[in-house]
Every structure is written in C-alpha cells, then in structure tokens.
Amino acid sequence: MTFTDVTDILDETRASFVLLLCHHNADPDAICSAYAFQSLLTKCRPNMTVEIGTGQGISRLSKHILKRIPITVKLQPDVAKADVIVLLDTNTIQQLGQLAEHVTKTAAPIIVIDHHAAHPQTEQIVKLCITNEEASSTCEMVYSFYKQLNIKPGLNESKALFLGITFDTRHFVLANSSTFKTISELSDIGVNPQEELFSLALPMDFSERVARMKACRRAKLIKIENWIIALSHVSAYQASAARALVDLGAHMAAVAGQKNEKIEISLRCTRDFNQATGIHLGRDIAQPLGEYLQGMGGGHATAAGVNGTGYIEKGLKRCLRLVKEQLSNQK
C-alpha cells in the first residue's frame, strides 16, 4: 500500500479537515511522524486543514522536542468535525485514551499508519491499514511516502523524522540498513545528527528514578528453562521500569500499573530472547493478554503494551501463562 491509497480516500470523501491522532502520552515517533505527515498532506492538498491531536497528552521528551520544532498538538481535538481520521504509531483505538469512544462512534473513514503489527479488531473498523513491521519507526514509513512522491521534506520535517527514528531505534541499536540509508539522506537535507541528538538527551526525573527502583525491589523473578522472566508493578513509568529490569539482566520483563479498575502492562525483552524463542511480544503476548483483560494490546517484537480492566496480580499471572505456553510450543 502506498500514499496514493491515502489520497484516494481523501478525494473520495472530499475531505476538507483531516485529524491526525497519536496514542496517549505520545512519544517522539508518534508526534514527529504526525508532524511530517501533516506537512506532506498540506503540500499535496493545500486547501485542506490538517491538525494533530492526542487524547491524553504527550510525553515529557516530546514536550522537549516541541521547543525545537514548531509542532502544534491539540490536546482536545474535535473528532466529530473530522472528515477523515488518521492514526499514526497507534494500532488500537484504546490507545487513544479519552478519545477512543468518540473515534469508535465516528462515521469518518479511519486510516492507520503504523510500524506495529496490525491488530485484528482495528482492521475490522478502519478503512485503510498501512503497516510495516520491517520499518524501524512510523517516521521511517512517513519518509517513504515522501520518497514515493519524489518530494524532499523541509529542514524542520527532516529533523522531526530524524528524532522519531532515533528514539524508536534506541539510538540506532534496533536500526537496519534502510534506517541508516534514511538517516544519511536526512543528513544530506541539512540535519546535523550530533546537534539533534541533544534533543533526546533528557535527564531522568526523580519520579521515574523512584519508579524504576521500586519495580526492581518488587520484582518477582521466574526461571523458565534458561530464561529469566521478571514481573513487577509500579503506579507510573511502567515502560521505563520494564526497560530497567531488562537492562539489569532479565530476558523479559512485564511491569503493571493500576488506576481504579484500569490496568496497564508494559512488556520488554532482549533481542536474544526474541530471536531464540520466536516470541513476538506484540502479537503473541500483548494481543491475547489485551483480549483477556477486555481491552487491547499490541506492539513490537521486543516492546509492547496492554490496556484493559482488572487487577495487577491477575494480569501478570495471565501474562506469565502466555509466555510459558509460547515457550512450550517452541519445543
């Protein structure tokens, strides 16, 4: 599928207002891909209004990037007004937070552009789903649209694409050959990698440090064959805590958090764990876990997330069971 598939839908609906939506606590890949995609749509359809929105704010790091790049994000976007809705770096409606209900009820066609595995429930309600798990980031996918149209992104758009790619590849640890080619081309446009990398050098705040240490203290370690699985819980920064547990030595970590009856679980694993077991966290663990918790889950092979209802102990217990089942299937 190409960018032409997107413009076909815009033309069919005679869209005059397009709303680009990012997941809650939107990270740099989400915000930066939306910004570059907004610019591309504006170039192709100058008379069309294109806005970026999110239901529950953006991440601290994304806010830092907004100081360097003129990205405008609506925190209370008008979903009902949109002729077409595009979800970027967001493969489930639940990830939209408080906007999820409004988007579910909309009559406007929905387009998904994401580098995560497509979620079956999402595919049933959207008009077009463009996904590419081989892409390092949604920013890299958006850059490919520029290439398809033989359009060079402007300097600010190039900087945004660079930052989104850098963030989602963990500073190129997860990059592939096409990623480095993209980075080279963005540099040729005028991006100074050394200068832009400072935008991602945000010091960890006190609360995140405390959350990481609490997760480590509360961690339950389970040894399955030669793998160490870490389960823990904190009230915030679950993703950061899961990364910390993996950095400390766990092959896979699941960290849960709960607010009232809502539960969130962040999953992380090492590349070795993924390659040796064949377990894809987004597809094999997060998706079925999300369904079990009457919510949704998805993500990458080595990083995924789940939102649903229930309790921490129940969610982590089910998560461990899914991992055990997947490992037993490998035998």
Image (spheres, grey):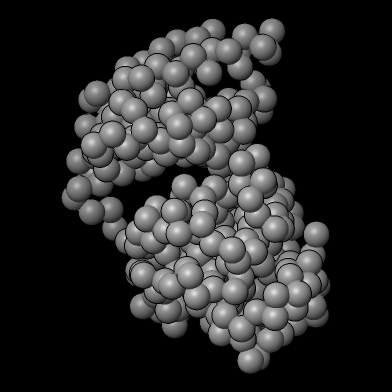
Residue lying farthest to the bottom in this orientation: 47
Percent position of residue 115, x then y: 64, 52
Depth check: give the residue in front, 237 or 296: 296
Position of 78 compared to 287: left or right?
A: left
Residue 59 visible here = no
Q: In which quadrant of the rendered image does the N terminus lie?
A: bottom right
- Residue at left 60%, top 66%? 108
Percent position of residue 31, x then y: 48, 66
Q: In which quadrant of the rendered image does the C terminus lie?
A: top right
Q: Is residue 26 above or below residue 118?
A: below
Percent position of residue 290, x then y: 49, 32
Q: Is residue 178 above or below residue 4?
A: above
Q: Is residue 91 above or below residue 292?
A: below
Q: Is residue 153 above or below residue 89?
A: below
Q: Residue 274 lies in what quarter of the image?
A: top right
Residue 74 visible here = yes
Label count reads 0
Depth check: give the residue in front, 108 or 41: 108
Position of 212 compared to 93: left or right?
A: left
- Residue at left 56%, top 42%? 299
Depth check: give the residue in front, 121 or 23: 121
Depth check: give the residue in front, 298 or 63: 298
Percent position of residue 265, x then y: 40, 34
- Residue at left 64%, top 21%? 277
- Residue at left 31%, top 44%? 237
